[in-house]
Image (spheres, grey):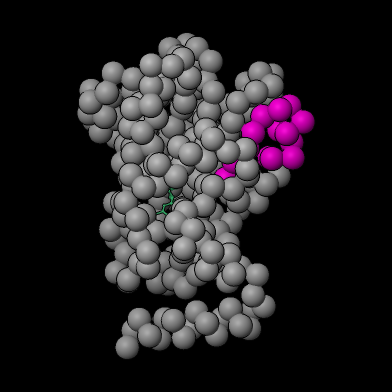
Amino acid sequence: MNNKTIWITGASSGIGKSLALKFAQEGWKVAISARRENLLNEISKSNENIIAFPLDVTDNEKCKSIFSQVKEKLGEVDISVFCTGIHDPKSEKTLNLEKVRKIMEVNFFGTVNSINAVYEYYKNKKSGQISIVSSVAGYRGLPAAGAYCASKSALSSFAESLYFDLKRSNVRVSLVSPGFIKTPMTDQNDFPMPMIKSPQFAAEQMFKGLTKSKGFEIHFPKSFTTIMKVLKVLPNGLYFKILEKGMKRIKD
Ligand SMILES: NC(=O)c1ccc[n+]([C@@H]2O[C@H](COP(=O)([O-])OP(=O)(O)OC[C@H]3O[C@@H](n4cnc5c(N)ncnc54)[C@H](OP(=O)(O)O)[C@@H]3O)[C@@H](O)[C@H]2O)c1
C-alpha cells in the first residue's frame, strides 16, 4: 500500500475497469466512476483499495460534487483519468444527427465536464496529472465513424491546449490514444480489428505511461499506432486511396 490516489471515470467496464484493478494491485487508492452502480460495487468489493462513486459525466454539477466526495474520502488526488466514452457503429453507417449529438455530449462534453470539476484543484495544487482518454480514431476521419472520430479529435485538440495552460502550474496533462482493445465497445464492431489487444494490456501500458514517463501522449500497441501516425501525416489524396483500398479488401 502506498499513499497515492487516482480517480478514474468510465471504470465500470473495459479499459477503465482494468486500469482501476491495475492501480489497486499496485497499492494505489482508486476512486471509480461510471453510471452502472452495480458494476462499480462489484469491482469495489473485489479489491479493498477501490471505492465506487457513481456518476453520469453529462451532468456538469454532479461531476463537481462527486469530485468533492472523492477528495473527502481519499484526500489528495494525484491523477485523474477521464476514460468515459461511447461508440455506436450501427448509427454511423448513415448521418444521424441525434446520435452525433449524443456521442459529442458524452465523449467530448462529458470529458470537459470532468476536467472542469478538477481544473481549479490541480491549478491550485501545482502538481498532479489530468489524463484524457482519446483514441487513434482522433487522428483522422475514418470510414463509418464520423461522430466518434470527431469527438476524439476534439478531445485530442482540447488536451493539447490544456497542456500549455496547466504546464504553467506544474500540472501534467497526458493524452491516451489506444488502438483496438477488446472491450464491450469494440465487441459491437463487425469488421476485422488489426492487432487488437486485451484491456489488461491497455492497463499495463497506461500504468507505465501515467506513472513512469513524463510525455504527453501514451499510445499503444506501438505496432498499430505507428501505422496510424503515418496515415495521419499523409496528404489527403493518398490517405483516401489507401483507406478505400483497405475497405474494398475487407468487403471482398
Ligand atoms: N476499446 C477500444 O478499442 C478503444 C480504442 C480507443 C479508445 N477507446 C476509448 O477508451 C475509453 C473506454 O472504452 P472501452 O473500450 O473500455 O469501452 P467500454 O467498456 O464500453 O467502457 C466505456 C465506459 O464509459 C462509461 N460511460 C459511458 N457513458 C457514460 C456516462 N454518460 N457517464 C459516465 N460514464 C459513462 C461506461 O460505464 P457506464 O455505462 O456504467 O456509465 C464504461 O465504464 C473510451 O473513451 C473509448 O472511446 C477505446
107, 249: nearer the viewer? 249
Residue lying at the far bottom of the rendered structure: 252
Q: Position of residue 134 (x, y in %)?
A: 52, 50
- At 50% across and 15% down in the image, what residue appears? 71
Q: Quadrant of the N terminus?
A: top left
Asked if residue 171 is among those painted magenta in the image, a careful observer would answer yes
To which quarter of the image does residue 46 belong? top left
- At 67% across and 78% down in the image, what residue appears? 235
Residue 108 in view (yes/no):
no
71 lies left or right of 15: right
Q: Up-down: is 162 above or below 122?
A: below
- At 32% across and 71% down in the image, what residue appears? 191
Q: Up-down: is 247 above or below 22?
A: below
Residue lying at the far right of the rendered structure: 168
Q: Position of residue 123 (x, y in %)?
A: 69, 24
Q: Position of residue 3 (x, y in %)?
A: 46, 15
Q: Quadrant of the C terminus?
A: bottom left
- At 65% across and 23% down in the image, what residue appears? 127
Asked if residue 215 is among those painted magenta in the image, a careful observer would answer no
219 lies left or right of 91: right
22, 77: nearer the viewer? 22
Residue lying at the far front of the rendered structure: 212
Q: Which residues are magenta?
A: 162-175
199, 96: nearer the viewer? 199
Q: Position of residue 192 (x, y in %)?
A: 32, 71
125 lies left or right of 26: right
